[in-house]
């Protein structure tokens, strides 16, 4: 017996101090669809919505899931991040929202990532918010647009714009679940109560199936007391809605978006890539993704 044998192994914990489960690799799927629609929402900008959309899509695709990314922000960052330049897109989600006869299959583009397709957006979408106001069932238009694609994918990720306006309400009305990226910064929690209130209103009035899938802490820096305090506060306020997986702060994310690639292919062994793979496994284990 060596001295090492006597030291009990400390079980791994997450940054909130909870035991960290081992999330199994998702079982292969025999068939695809119908998709679960997940909206990535936070009315604050720069919290990691688009980064999470792209990298979670790539991670789920790496586990054999067919994923559609819906860029639902007029900034078009998800489209750019997946390799498309906004002004070259002749048809976008905007056309599908505004033209009753537009066909989603004509607008969806394959991306450089196997099993990830994109429904692109560009600045045209900024006009939709105003133009949709007068429409009948204006909150359910994205839901209607996505329906013909739902059988082709296992997961549809909707990258929302940083607001709680009509576009975001459309995303929430189309969704089964909401994933809330939250930057590990002071004031991060401000606004989350309002966001959850909006989710509850949409659930009551428009979309009874809608649930909060989880809160994902992003840009976490374990060296700062500050980051750890934010995690503790979020855990205190939201309990197990805080996911075990936490995304660390690293320049590899901006680097990989400059390269227009997910981190899972840009730097596959980087802790940031491993974190998004763990997020994919955690969501599948929670039943939030196929
Ligand atoms: P949002 O879509 O919420 O506005 P983004 O995903 O575009 O946020 O992220 C905002 C900026 O922060 C981008 O430049 C992105 O590359 C960077 N970023 C995102 N996640 C991280 C992270 N974990 N660490 C460091 N930088 C990040
Ligand atoms: Mg964004």
Image (tube, rainbow, N blue to C red):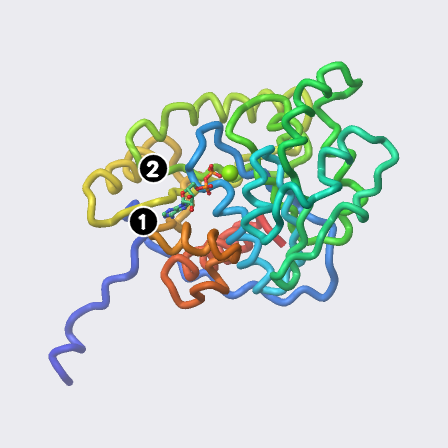
Gap in Å between the C-alphas at discs 2 and 1?
A: 10 Å
Residue that badge 2 annotates:
235
Residue 25 image offset from top left, x and y in percent: 52, 65
Q: Which residue lies furthest to the top in this view?
A: 134
Tag of residue 18: 1
Q: Which residue lies furthest to the left in this view?
A: 3
| Image vertical order of residue 157 relative to residue 189, above or below | below
Residue at 56%, 26% in the rendered image: 199
- Mark 1: few/some/many CA within 10 Å (<14, 14-19, 20+): few
Q: In which quarter of the image is residue 3?
A: bottom left
| Image vertical order of residue 186 relative to residue 110, above or below | above
Q: Quadrant of residue 181?
A: top left
Residue 178 image offset from top left, x and y in percent: 55, 37
Residue at 63%, 64% in the rendered image: 64
- Mark 2: few/some/many CA within 10 Å (<14, 14-19, 20+): some
First reached walking from the N terminus: tag 2 or tag 1: 1
**Residue in the foreground of this view, choosing between 200 and 59:** 59
In the image, is the residue at mark 2 within 8 Å of ligand 1 by its beta carbon? no
The N terminus, quarter of image: bottom left
Q: Do the residues labelled 2 and 1 touch (CB within 8 Å)?
A: yes
User: Total label count?
Assistant: 2
**Residue in the foreground of this view, choosing between 240 and 159:** 159
Question: Seen in the image, is 274 located left or right of residue 225?
Answer: right
Q: Is residue 198 visible?
A: yes
Residue at 57%, 58% in the rendered image: 60
């Amino acid at each position: 017996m060596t001295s090492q044998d006597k030291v009990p192994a400390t079980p791994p914990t997450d940054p909130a101090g909870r035991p960290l489960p081992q999330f199994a690799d998702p079982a292969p799927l025999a068939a695809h669809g119908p998709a679960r629609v997940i909206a990535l929402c936070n009315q604050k900008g720069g919290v990691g919505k688009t980064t999470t959309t792209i990298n979670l899509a790539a991670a789920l695709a790496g586990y054999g899931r067919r994923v559609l990314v819906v860029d639902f922000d007029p900034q078009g960052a998800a489209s750019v991040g997946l390799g498309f330049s906004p002004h070259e897109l002749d048809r976008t989600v905007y056309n599908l929202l505004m033209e009753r006869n537009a066909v989603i299959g004509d607008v969806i583009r394959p991306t450089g990532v196997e099993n990830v397709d994109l429904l692109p957006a560009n600045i045209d979408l900024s006009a939709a918010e105003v133009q949709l106001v007068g429409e009948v069932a204006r909150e359910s238009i994205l839901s209607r647009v996505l329906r013909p694609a739902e059988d082709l994918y296992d997961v549809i990720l909707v990258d929302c714009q940083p607001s709680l306006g009509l576009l975001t309400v459309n995303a929430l009305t189309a969704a089964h679940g909401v994933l809330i990226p939250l930057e590990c910064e002071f004031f991060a929690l401000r606004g989350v109560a309002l966001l959850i209130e909006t989710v509850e209103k949409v659930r009551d009035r428009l979309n009874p199936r809608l649930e909060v899938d989880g809160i994902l802490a992003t840009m976490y820096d374990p060296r700062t007391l500050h980051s750890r305090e934010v995690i503790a506060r979020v855990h205190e306020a939201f309990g197990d809605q805080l996911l075990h997986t936490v995304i660390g702060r690293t320049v590899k994310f901006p680097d990989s978006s400059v390269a227009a690639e997910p981190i899972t292919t840009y730097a596959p062994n980087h802790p940031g890539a491993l974190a998004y793979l763990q997020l994919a496994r955690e969501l599948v284990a929670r039943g939030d993704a196929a």
